[in-house]
Amino acid sequence: MDPTATESVRDQKQRLHQRITALVDALNTRIADFSLPAGATTYPQRRRVVVQRNRLRHPLNLRLAARDPARGNQRIIAWNATDYLVLGHHHAPVPLQGALAALARERAPERVRDIAPTTYYFDGILYALLDNEAPGAGRRRNTEAVGRGLVLDPNEPPDPNPTSPIRHLRFPPAALIVEPQDVRFDDDINDTLPDDARLPRNTIALTPTYTDVGQLILPRPIRLAQGQGEVSTLNIKRYGLPVGSAYAVTDFFVEGANLRSQWWALDLKPPPWGPHATHVSGRSVYVCSSRFHEDDEVRLLRPLFDSNNEDERQHVIDQFTNAAVMNNDLIAEHRRLEQLAAQTRRRYPDLFNEAASIVRTYRHAP
């Protein structure tokens, strides 16, 4: 049956079931190997992951950054962002402490969690920039940048344990020097500065900033000492450097990217069962998996299901099948695009043959 013909949801599921089952079973055998070679502290090749949910990103980023071969034997420099309680225009922000600070690190609202609660640095670490403050200099949101230097806060105390593999700073650095990866710019201004004030070529300096204000939902109401009464939510903002590690990213980050030349793994595991579980996003699965040229290039961060649990396997198959179902409007648009593509192929057969030859050459390149 023509997959672009109008079908009911039930008919689509029946048609897709066998193919989805084969896909799910095949994917569940392609689990990425994250073990370190014997005696090694870093991977032989940089490992990166695409996840569907932001909550997984922070712990993965720290672990993968620490094992990045770019680190070599370098010491890791780490610092925490600071979360502030926002009480209004007539009150200065108050740093969160104790249990509230821990809660903010764990459950920071969307507007606040862009800046990670903990950030690592070593020369060569891979970051993603978080704002668009200087597009001409490569400071654009989601641009990859490599860490090239740190300027410590003037109040930073001496290192209490120089032999530790990680130095934990008390304050965020005064500046982070990064090299954006998709731009090269002239150094006319840099060249006019004194030697001790120049930045390395093609680098920019980032300084700490505040995020937008977001609403932190509390597990139970509390009474604030600042005379605000009993509250069940808090307005907070985060102070830190506007970068995030780029080892664990979302599908939005890799949209349009080519993952063939790097080591990537995907997290496609559906959410858990239960009344609050969400569905698998068909768009997310498509974006993630279509970044590869061949199906056998796809690796998974973790299994989709326990191979000894048939109920869980069927749940995954159902979730992927539901994600593949198209509504009538999407079916009609798919049909229109297929027809236009067929017309173009008939009009320019020589160009399509040349393109096919280039693709074959590229796929077999070392």
Image (tube, rainbow, N blue to C red):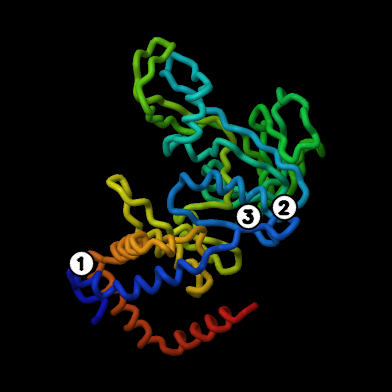
List x then y, in percent, for residue 24. Answer: 40, 68
**Image side of residue 196 versus residue 261, left or right:** right
Question: Are the residues flagged by discs 2 and 3 in contact, CB closer than 8 Å?
Answer: no
Query: Which residue position holds label 3?
Result: 181
Q: CA distance from mark 1 to mark 3?
A: 45 Å
Q: How many residues crowd mark 2 within 10 Å: few (<14), some (14–19), many (20+)?
A: some
Q: Nearer the viewer, residue 188 or 79?
A: 79
Task: Note whether 196 is above or below 326 in the view shown.
Answer: above
Looking at the rendered image, the disc whose residue lies closer to the viewer, 2 or 3, is 2
Task: Note whether 227 is above or below 152 in the view shown.
Answer: above
- Amino acid type, residue under disc 2 in the picture: Thr
Q: Residue at x 30, y 66 (%)?
A: 321
Q: Residue at x 70, y 50 (%)?
A: 124
The numbered dot on residue 167 is none
Identify the element where label 3 is drawn: loop
Question: Are the residues flagged by discs 1 and 3 in contact, CB closer than 8 Å?
Answer: no
The numbered dot on residue 41 is 2
Query: Which residue position holds label 1?
Result: 9
- Amino acid type, residue under disc 1 in the picture: Val
Looking at the rendered image, the disc whose residue lies closer to the viewer, 1 or 3, is 1
**Image side of residue 305 versus residue 264, left or right:** left
Quadrant the C terminus occupies:
bottom right
